[in-house]
Amino acid sequence: MNWNDLKICLAIAEAGSLAGAARALGINHSTVFRRLNALEDDLKLRVFDRLPEGYVPTPVGERMIELAEEADTAVQAIERELAGQDLEPTGLVRLTTAPNLARTIVPRAVSALRKSHPGIVVETLVGDSDYDLNRREADIALRATTRPPGHLVGRRLTGLSWWICGRASSRRRAPKSADALAGLPLIGADAAMMRLESFQWLETNYRDDIVARANDLSTMAALTVAGVGYSLLPSDQDVRGLRRHCRVDHIDAELWLLTHPDLRKVRRIRAVWDALAAVGLESA
């Protein structure tokens, strides 16, 4: 059996559709359709029922996916174990971080690495969504969080505060406290960003005042600078044309470096880790 076909089945089961599986795997919808049909033909079994609500595993499909998940976990463990034996400070390191950190901390760290470890290539995955370090979607994460996952190795770099921000040149009445936002146009977050305590608070207290939404902090800042409304942003957001008006005292976060325990001794990953830590602590 082709392992790649099992990975396609796992992706379909997780997404519930061919299109979602194709997006997750970065391949064409037609490829997913063809590979699934070929697998079912080879097995002479139907793995998924095609229902109006999506692709749902059959009983035999559920068991096959359960075993495939166990195999996937084993493959990931093998990859991390082998990566842990890689002692040369050369090769690719995948870093995931938010757009603002990718513009401020990452360039300085990579510039320093080019001088000290020219054989290391840093691939930066930019976005406010989380990549799965267990699945080696990334090797290192530079994240703002108050609750770093317990299964990862982490280092706290600095604390972050959250502020109500507005357009620097705005003539609107500026809020003097977080309790004075009612009636003001606000920039909210999409569903994925609701994992953050800050946007849960904004949604709970000022949902009716939200006039626009975004799924990343840089876009929220840009909407604010354009005069659309006020936004709730962390202290590491430093954008021209943006003004901080008042701090939300009960919401705080921290900037963390995170990696998987199996990778912490890999020299190329340790080198990138140290470079990011040096710049992050320097910026604190």
Image (cartoon, helix red, strand yellow):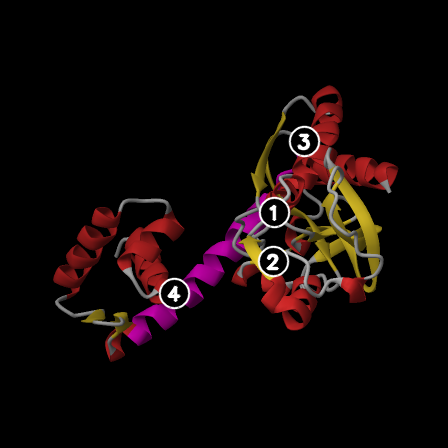
Q: Which numbered circle lies on residue 188?
A: 2
On the rendered image, what quadrant is the N terminus found in? bottom left
Which label is found at residue 228? 1
Q: Examine the structure image and report whether residue 270 is included in the region drawn in magenta.
A: no
Q: Secondary structure at mark 3?
A: loop
Q: Which residue is mark 3?
A: 89
Residue for point 72% across, 24% down: 111
Nearer to the camera, 38 or 129 = 129
Mark 4 and mark 3: span between their CA atoms? 36 Å
In this rendering, the label closer to the viewer, 4 or 3: 4
Q: Amino acid at mark 1?
A: Val
Observer-nearest of 202 and 135 = 202
Q: Distance from label 1 to label 2 (Cα)?
A: 11 Å
Q: Is residue 157 visible?
A: no
| Residue 260 can be seen in this image | yes
Query: Which SS type dominates the magenta stretch?
Result: helix
Q: Is residue 217 left or right of residue 137?
A: right
The residue type indicated by label 4 comes to Glu
Question: Which badge, 1 or 2, comes first in the chain's sequence?
Answer: 2
